[in-house]
Image: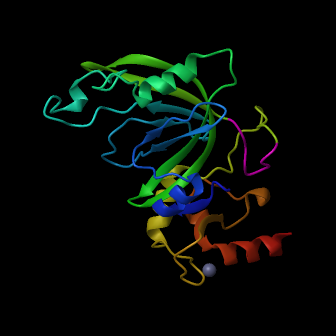
C-alpha cells in the first residue's frame, strides 16, 4: 500500500473488502475503521489536515435529509439514529475516549475527483469534541498519523522527522487534472501513482506541481529500478 497510489472507487472498495457507501465506517478495535474525506470546493464537511499530513481534524457526519429533517446542516449532529442505535459519530466518539484499550485505528481516504481517491494513511483516533459550529453542534474527531508507510510498514513514525515527502492533497488534485488521469509516458489509465520527478531522496519537493507527475505502475517501477 502506498500513499502515492491513485485509486478508483472500485480499487478502494476491493482493498477494504467492503462497499464504502458512506463517509464514516466504524470497525471496533483492533479492527481498522475507514473514513472518507474531501477538501474539494463545495465539500459538505470541514476536514482539516495539517500540511505535513500528520494531524487530521475530521468533522462528523450529518443525518440524511428527510421529511423530519429538511436541512441536516441546521440540526445538532445526533448521537443516535431515529431507531435509537448509535450513529457512526457516536461509535467513533466512544472509541476515542476509551483509555483502557489500544487506540482505534482509522484508514483515511481523500477524494481527488469524483470516483478518484488517494490514501492518506493510517491514523490513530486521539480524541474528539462535540463543539459549537454556528447554530448547532458537530463532532470533531482528532486523528494522528500512526505509521509512515512510505518508509516502512513496520516502523512507527519518528516524531522528529516531518514527512515532507508526502504530496499534499491540493497538489494531487492539480497534477491529476493536468495529466488527465493518465501515465505521462504511455497514457495508461489504470494502476496509477503520483511520482516525484526529482526523487524526494535527492531533494525533490512534494510542494510544487511541476515536480510531481502521474505514472502507471510499470513506469513507476522502471524508474525506481534506475534510481537503485
Ligand atoms: Zn506508463
Whether residue 139 appears in this view of the structure is yes
Answer whether residue 30 is magenta in the image: no
The location of residue 43, given as percent across then percent down, is 34, 44
| Residue in the image at 68% along x and 77% along y | 219
Q: Residue at x 60, y 41 (%)?
A: 53
- Residue placed furthest toward the bottom: 186
Above or below for 173 versus 55: below
Q: Position of residue 8 (x, y in %)?
A: 49, 63
In this rendering, position of residue 139 left or right of residue 154: left
Ligand 1 location (quadrant):
bottom right
The answer to if 151 sits in the magenta stretch is yes
**Residue 127 visible in this rendered orientation of the protein:** no
Horizontal arrangement in the rendering, residue 124 relative to residue 174 (left or right): right
- In the picture, the quarter occupied by the C terminus is bottom right
Q: Is residue 175 left or right of residue 84?
A: right
The residues colored magenta run 146-154
Residue 121 or residue 16, whichever sits in front: 16
- The part of the image, by quadrant, that contains residue 102 is top right
Q: Position of residue 96 (x, y in %)?
A: 56, 22
Q: Main secondary structure of the magenta part?
A: loop
Residue 186 vs 72, above or below: the answer is: below
Residue at the farthest front position: 83
Residue pictured at 64% horizontal, 50% vertical: 166
Amino acid at each position: 500500500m502506498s500513499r502515492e497510489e491513485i485509486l478508483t472507487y472500485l480499487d478502494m472498495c476491493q482493498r477494504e473488502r467492503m462497499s464504502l457507501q458512506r463517509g464514516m465506517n466504524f470497525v471496533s478495535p483492533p479492527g481498522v475503521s475507514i473514513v472518507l474525506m474531501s477538501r474539494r470546493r463545495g465539500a459538505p464537511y470541514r476536514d482539516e489536515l495539517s500540511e505535513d499530513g500528520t494531524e487530521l481534524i475530521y468533522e462528523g457526519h450529518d443525518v440524511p435529509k428527510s421529511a423530519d429533517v429538511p436541512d441536516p446542516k441546521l440540526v445538532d449532529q445526533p448521537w443516535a439514529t431515529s431507531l435509537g442505535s448509535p450513529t457512526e459519530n457516536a461509535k467513533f466518539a466512544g472509541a476515542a475516549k476509551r483509555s483502557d484499550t489500544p487506540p482505534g485505528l482509522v484508514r483515511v481516504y481523500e477524494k481527488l475527483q469524483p470516483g478518484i481517491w488517494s490514501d492518506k494513511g493510517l491514523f490513530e483516533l486521539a480524541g474528539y469534541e462535540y463543539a459549537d459550529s454556528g447554530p448547532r453542534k458537530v463532532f470533531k474527531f482528532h486523528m494522528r498519523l500512526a505509521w509512515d508507510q512510505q518508509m516502512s510498514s513496520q516502523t512507527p513514525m519518528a516524531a522528529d522527522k516531518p514527512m515532507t515527502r508526502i504530496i499534499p492533497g491540493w497538489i494531487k488534485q492539480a497534477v491529476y487534472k493536468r495529466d488527465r488521469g493518465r501515465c505521462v509516458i504511455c497514457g495508461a489509465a489504470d494502476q496509477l501513482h503520483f511520482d516525484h520527478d526529482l526523487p524526494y531522496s535527492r531533494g525533490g519537493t512534494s510542494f510544487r506541481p511541476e515536480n510531481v507527475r502521474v505514472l502507471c505502475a510499470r513506469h513507476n517501477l522502471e524508474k525506481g529500478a534506475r534510481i537503485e
